[in-house]
Image (tube, grey):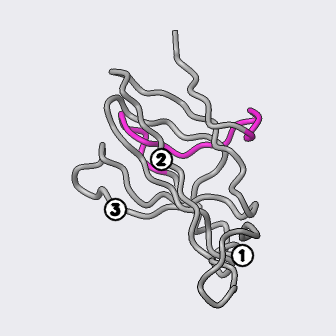
């Protein structure tokens, strides 16, 4: 939802995409619990700097994300037309030292790192 002060010259509300950047400066994987997107539509992976062969391979994301050490992941909130895509679009990423998609029961209200011991 556009904020009341975000308007163009004609007074029309500005509409833009919402992004989430996850940075992992730690040397090993960090699991992030993804926050709810601003419009509640969910997130799509746009870029993963750990995946050197396919850094811009787009995937729908769930509630948690493993981010490889010393890498950056860029997510974009789903557009309204992307929300009702079939579950077959929710691909699992390979279980590599990198970003992997998975479901968790953790609270999805805050992007918070969970360090493995």
Query: Marks 3 and 2, Cα distance to the nearest angstrom?
Result: 14 Å
Closer to the camera, 6 or 84?
Answer: 6
Foreground disc of the pair 1, 2: 2
Q: Position of residue 116 (x, y in %)?
A: 52, 15
- Earlier along the polypeptide chain: callout 3 or callout 2? 2
What residue do we see at 71% from left, 58% from top?
38
Does the stretch in magenta take in 32? no
Q: Up-down: is 108 above or below 82?
A: above
- Residue pushed farthest top? 117
Q: Is residue 54 left or right of residue 92?
A: left
Q: For this view, does 4 lie left or right of residue 68?
A: right
- 89 is higher (above) or lower (below) than 15: above
Q: Specify which label sits upstream in the sequence, 1 or 3.
A: 3
Q: Secondary structure at mark 2?
A: strand
Q: Nearer the viewer, mark 3 or mark 2?
A: 2
Secondary structure under badge 1?
A: loop
Q: Which residue is mark 2?
A: 21
Residue 111 spot, x, y in % from top left: 62, 37
**What secondary structure is the stretch in magenta mostly built from?**
loop
Q: Residues within 10 Å of mark 1 (few under 14, many from 20)?
A: few
* Image quarter (top left, top right, bottom left or bottom right) of the N terminus: bottom right
Image location of residue 84, percent across then percent down = 72, 75
Q: Residue at x 56, y 69 (%)?
A: 17
Mark 3, secondary structure of its residue: loop
Q: Which residues are magenta?
A: 93-109
Reading the image, the residue beneath label 3 is 56
Q: Which residue is mark 1?
A: 84
Asked whether 96 falls inside the magenta stretch, the response is yes
Residue 92 x, y percent position in the rendering: 52, 52
Of residues 105 and 27, the one nearer the viewer is 27
- Compared to residue 109, the image places residue 38 above or below, namely below
Residue drawn at (69%, 77%) of the image: 80
């Amino acid at each position: 939802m556009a904020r009341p002060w975000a308007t163009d010259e004609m007074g029309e509300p500005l509409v833009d995409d919402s992004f989430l950047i996850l940075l992992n400066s730690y040397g090993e994987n960090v699991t992030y619990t993804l926050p709810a997107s601003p419009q509640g539509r969910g997130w799509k992976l746009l870029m993963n700097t750990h995946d050197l062969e396919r850094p811009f391979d787009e995937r729908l994301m769930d509630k948690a994300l493993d981010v490889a050490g010393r890498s950056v992941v860029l997510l974009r909130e789903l557009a309204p037309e992307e929300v009702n895509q079939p579950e077959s679009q929710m691909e699992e990423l390979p279980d590599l030292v990198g970003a992997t998609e998975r479901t968790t029961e953790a609270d999805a209200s805050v992007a918070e790192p969970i360090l493995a011991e």
